[in-house]
Amino acid sequence: MSFLKSFIRKLLGRMNSDDLNRYLQKHDVTVGKKTVFFEAHSCFIDVQRPWMLSIGSYCKITRGTIILQHDYSRSVLRRAYGEVLDVCKQAKIGNNVFIGMNSIILMGTTIGDNVIVGAGSVVSGTIPSNCVVAGNPAKVIRTLDEHYEIIKRRNCEHAIETAAVFIQRYHRDPTIEEMGAFFPLYLERSREALEKNHIRTALSGDEENEVVEAFLNSKPQFADYDAFLQEVHKRV
């Protein structure tokens, strides 16, 4: 019954991530745990030969993504040369992979673990683990370590800009809750602080206990939220 409901929602364009996971499992496509499809109704996952496709755990696959495992361009060869020549190669997506909006994963593509695929990429061939790729055709633009260092350096500046623009628009300070995922910069390291400020720690495609433990074992960049806001107001 759950599969039937998922199929109906797919037809109506209302399929969610759980629906798509059930649909793929029903068609015998391998999908790991905690993998999430954002706006699942807009994604196309090729299930023609399900044994030729595997998607790992903790993947985040976003709107408009297409994952292929066959190619019917062989029809041109049939008309031109008279032979039926089939083509099919295995497609593999590793663990902890983010696929940006409107990306296409072509037949025969292998993507390693811990990979970020930029929006609108066309990916083929073998993508190594621990890297960021983007473009058409997609190419490695940096390692995951390099990407981490860039994002880490920019994290505080992005938070300050976010708060500053908020103040300019609404003429008040944003709340900690409204600042969202910038909370590690200034929030007291306690479970009570997380609950009091309604911090979302149940992140899509992740393990909540790991998110909380990592937060509790880290150190803030600012003494508290007021100290952060003082820095923001210097720039408004």
Image (tube, rainbow, N blue to C red):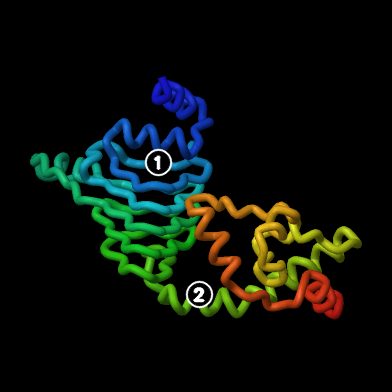
Vertical comparison of 213 with 219: above or below: above
Q: The C terminus lies in which quarter of the figure?
A: bottom right
Is residue 236 in view from this perspective?
A: no
Residue drawn at the location 39% of the way across and 71% of the way down: 131
Name the residue: 54% across, 63% down.
Answer: 213
Return the residue nearer the eye: 175 or 24: 175
Counting from the top left corner in percent of width and height, residue 231 is at: 81, 78
Q: Amino acid at mark 1?
A: Phe
In the figure, is residue 147 to the left or right of 180?
Answer: left
Residue 17 seen anywhere in this rendered image of the structure: yes
Identify residue for label 2.
148
Q: CA distance from mark 1 to mark 2?
A: 30 Å
Amino acid bearing label 2? Tyr
Q: Within 10 Å of the Cα at label 2, are there few (<14), some (14-19), or many (20+) other Cα atoms?
A: few
In what element is the residue under mark 1? strand
* Residue of label 1: 44
Q: Which label sits in the foreground, 1 or 2?
A: 2
Circle 2: element type: helix
Question: For residue 20, what is the image quadrant?
Answer: top left
Query: Left or right: where does residue 46 sit relative to residue 135?
Result: left
Contact between marks 1 and 2 (CB within 8 A): the answer is: no
- Across the whole image, how many numbered discs are drawn on residues? 2
- Indicate which disc, 1 or 2, sits on the residue closer to the N terminus: 1
